[in-house]
Image (cartoon, rainbow, N blue to C red):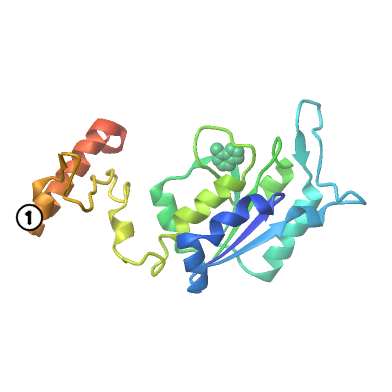
Amino acid sequence: MRIDIVTLLPELIRSPFEASILKRAQTKGLVEVHLHDLREFGRGKHKQVDDYAFGGGAGMVIKAEPLFECIEGLLAERDYDAVVYTSPDGQTLDQPMANRMSSFTNLLLVCGHYKGIDQRVRDRLITHEISIGDYVLSGGELAAAVIADALIRLIPGVLNDETSALTDSFQDNLLAPPVYTRPAEFRGMKVPEVLTSGNFTLIDQWRSEQALSRTRERRPDLLGE
Ligand code: ADE
């Protein structure tokens, strides 16, 4: 998978891709992440990329010209499965969406900023609008990093244990069960006995029960209850 990210703040989004799983995914050649600094497409001596909103009101709007130039340049180089704009008014990201998008070949993420981007960019160039939740961030960069992380970890070969993404919370509309590691007893707190029993039928059964009871308690909406 190739992910292109158009941003005014490349320094804000660089570090998540330079550590841990996301870095290893790139080193293994399973994903390429390319950052594109929108400022380079700015107009005039000051490389202006934003302007006042027509009709007045607080906040600057990112101009159409630099975004068109940057995005059209990328579109001319390859076909994208989706051109995504990160915005609180988009469709809320969930695990089924992440699963679908993880099989994309080329993904273009456009980070919003200030009061938004000129609507004509959204009308003409953007194919999907995604929110990461019902709250407002100061820019789309962190949202783009969240989206990229959710997809990249699902690409086969990215996680060491191929099956571990399958046991994530949400993959079967259930939250994940509790997990424990050594020591088996810590400050008087014992690990549930079944987990040290070696009986994997019982362990699977216990995990299913825990996932269900945890989901019922914390997120009954996932069970449609
Ligand atoms: N930009 C600002 N807030 C956002 C959100 N909640 N999701 C996606 N992009 C955003």
Relative image position of residue 200 (x, y in whole percent): 10, 58
| Left or right: 34 as drawn, with respect to 176 | right
Residue extending furthest toward the front: 187
Quadrant of the image where one finds ligand 1: top right
Relative image position of residue 215 (x, y in whole percent): 25, 37
How many labels were placed on the picture? 1
Res. 173 image quadrant? top left
| Left or right: 198 as drawn, with respect to 6 | left
Relative image position of residue 85 (x, y in whole percent): 61, 48
Reading the image, the residue beneath label 1 is: 197
> What residue type is disc 1 on?
Ser
Please say whether residue 225 is visible from this viewpoint. no
Point 55% across, 59% down: residue: 17
Point 42% across, 45% down: residue: 94
Q: Nearer the viewer, residue 72 or 160?
A: 160
Point 75% across, 54% down: residue: 38
Label 1: few (<14), some (14–19) or many (≥20) C-alpha neighbours in 10 Å: few
Residue 162 sits above or below residue 16 on the image: below
Point 85% across, 47% down: residue: 48
Q: What secondary structure is marked by label 1? A: loop
Q: Which quadrant: the C terminus?
A: top left
Residue 12 sits above or below residue 107 on the image: above
Please say whether residue 28 is visible from this viewpoint. yes
Residue extending furthest toward the top: 57
Res. 222 image quadrant? top left
Q: Nearer the viewer, residue 62 or 142?
A: 142
Query: Does the beta carbon of the residue at mark 1 sit less than 8 Å from ligand 1?
Result: no
Relative image position of residue 107 (x, y in whole percent): 57, 60
Residue extending furthest toward the bottom: 29
